[in-house]
Amino acid sequence: MKKIGRNFFSLVWTGVRRNYDNLDDNIAKHLGETDADNPVEIHLSRMFSEVFKRHSKDEADRLFIVGTRSTTPSLRKVSSRPVKPWFFSRVFTVLAVSFIMLILLLFLFKSNKAIPGLIFIGSLAVPFSLLMMFFEINVYQNISVLQLLTTFLVGGILSLLVTMTFYMMLPIRSEVSIESALIVGITEELAKCVVIIFFY
C-alpha cells in the first residue's frame, strides 16, 4: 500500500510540476520578457516573504484601488512586478480570532446566540482569505473590489441554485451509496463550472 501511495504521489507531483512549467512558459511568452525556453522560477518562500512584515494602512489601501480604467496598469508595468501577497494573512487572522472569541462566548457563557456566528465565520475564514490572496496575486490589477465581491457572493449563491436544479434533473437517490456520492460530487463541481463560465 505504501509503495502504491508513493507512486501515486510521485505521479501527481510530476503533473503539478509540468503544469507549473507550462504556466510559466505561457506567462513568459505572453509578456515577452523572457525567452520561451527559460521558464520563470517559482519560489514560495520569496512569494510569501511579506506576510510577517509590518505594513502601513496606506499599503493596504493601495491594494484595493485597482480595477478601474485609471488604475489598471499596462502589461509593461506589471510584467516585472514581484508577486508578494500579504493582506490575506491579516484577513485570516481577524476571522480566526473572531472564531475563537465566538467559541469562548459559546462555552464560557453558554450563549446559543454564538452558534450562527460560529457557522458563518467558520465557513468563511479559509475561502474568503484565499479569495483575498488570489485578488492580491492578480498582477494585472484589472479586477475591482466590486467585481470581486459580486462574483464571490452572487456566484456562491448561484452555484447552489444550479446545483439544486441539477439535483432535480439527475437520478440522485437519498440512500448512502458509492454511486450517489459520485453523482453528487460530479453534480456540484459541474454546477461550479457552469457559474464560472457564466461570469467569465
Image (spheres, rainbow, N blue to C red):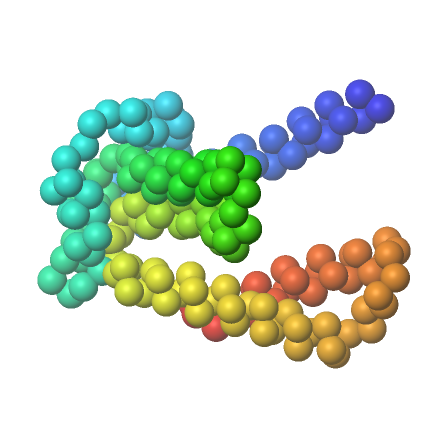
Which x, y percent locates residue 135?
A: 33, 50
Which x, y percent locates residue 187?
A: 69, 65
For residue 92, above or below residue 54: below
Please give the name of the residue rendered at 30% of the width and 45% of the height, measured from the top-left corner: 136
Q: Is residue 28 visible?
A: no
- Relative side of 16 to 101, left or right: right
Of the pair 38 and 5, the residue shown nearer to us: 5
Please give the name of the residue rendered at 73% of the width and 31% of the height, measured from the top-left corner: 8
Please give the name of the residue rendered at 32% of the width and 65% of the height, measured from the top-left corner: 147
Which x, y percent locates residue 190?
A: 64, 64
Please give the name of the residue rendered at 56% of the width and 68% of the height, measured from the top-left corner: 159
- Most distant residue in the top direction: 2
- Relative side of 186 to 118, left or right: right
For residue 150, above or below residue 88: below
- Relative side of 183 to 179, left or right: left
Of the pair 4 and 40, the residue shown nearer to us: 4
The quadrant the C terminus occupies is bottom left
- Give the number of callouts: 0
The quadrant the N terminus occupies is top right
Which x, y percent locates residue 146?
A: 28, 65
Q: Is residue 158 visible?
A: yes
For residue 15, above or below residue 139: above
Name the quadrant containing residue 3.
top right
